[in-house]
Image (tube, rainbow, N blue to C red):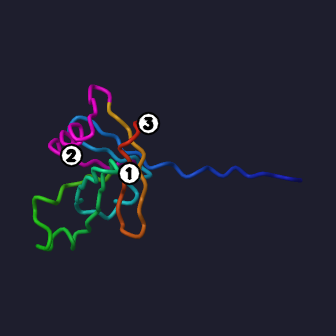
Amino acid sequence: MDINWFNEKPKECVITLAQGNLTLNKAAANYFEHAYSVMLGIENKQRLVVIKPLNKAEALKQDIPENRKYKITVRSSYARITNKAFVEELVQMFGLTLGTEPLKFKASWNQKDQLMIVDMKEVL
């Protein structure tokens, strides 16, 4: 008997940009399970958004100014970063149109640097 067993492919990391927040799907949220807060960055030339998780010890240290750390809410099936100013900056910087429907972007995890990289070049 020649059986080919079903093997579900890993889900892609997707970040949804909506009015005032970024939502990470379950595949992306898994990398932030132990995050106490995050840092948000923009790489303008390559049109990337970078999300760096901070554990509680890193977040509470005074090494990083408070205005560079943002709250992340992690649930069982998603994670959300609420920051209206950051979303507005992305919309303006990348010329996006954000109406009633959110925009979705592919993301990937950089294991070496422990960063989520969001590719803003193409809306899914």
| Position of the C terminus by quadrant | top left
| Tally of numbered discs | 3
Q: Quadrant of residue 15?
A: top left
| Boundaries of the magenta span | 76-101
Residue occupying the point 55% across, 52% down: 10
What residue sits right under mark 2 in the picture? Answer: 82
Real-space CA distance between mark 3 and mark 2, rounded to the nearest whole angstrom: 21 Å
- Is 88 one of the magenta-colored residues? yes
Does 62 appear above or below 118? below
* Residue occupying the far front of the picture: 45
Residue occupying the point 30% across, 39% down: 17
Give the residue type that dot 2 points to.
Thr
What is the crowding at mark 2: few (fewer than 14 residues within 10 Å), some, or many (at least 20)? some
Which dot, 3 or 2, sits closer to the camera? 3
Q: Quadrant of residue 87?
A: top left
What residue sits right under mark 1 in the picture? Answer: 76
Q: Quadrant of residue 85?
A: top left
- Residue 54 image point, x, y percent: 25, 66
Does 17 appear above or below 52? above
- Residue 77 image point, x, y percent: 39, 48
Give the residue type that dot 1 points to.
Ser
Which dot, 1 or 2, sits closer to the camera? 2
**Residue 64 relative to residue 35: left or right:** left
- Is 57 one of the magenta-colored residues? no
Give the residue type that dot 3 points to.
Leu
Real-space CA distance between mark 1 and mark 3, rounded to the nearest whole angstrom: 23 Å
**Residue 83 relative to residue 49: left or right:** left
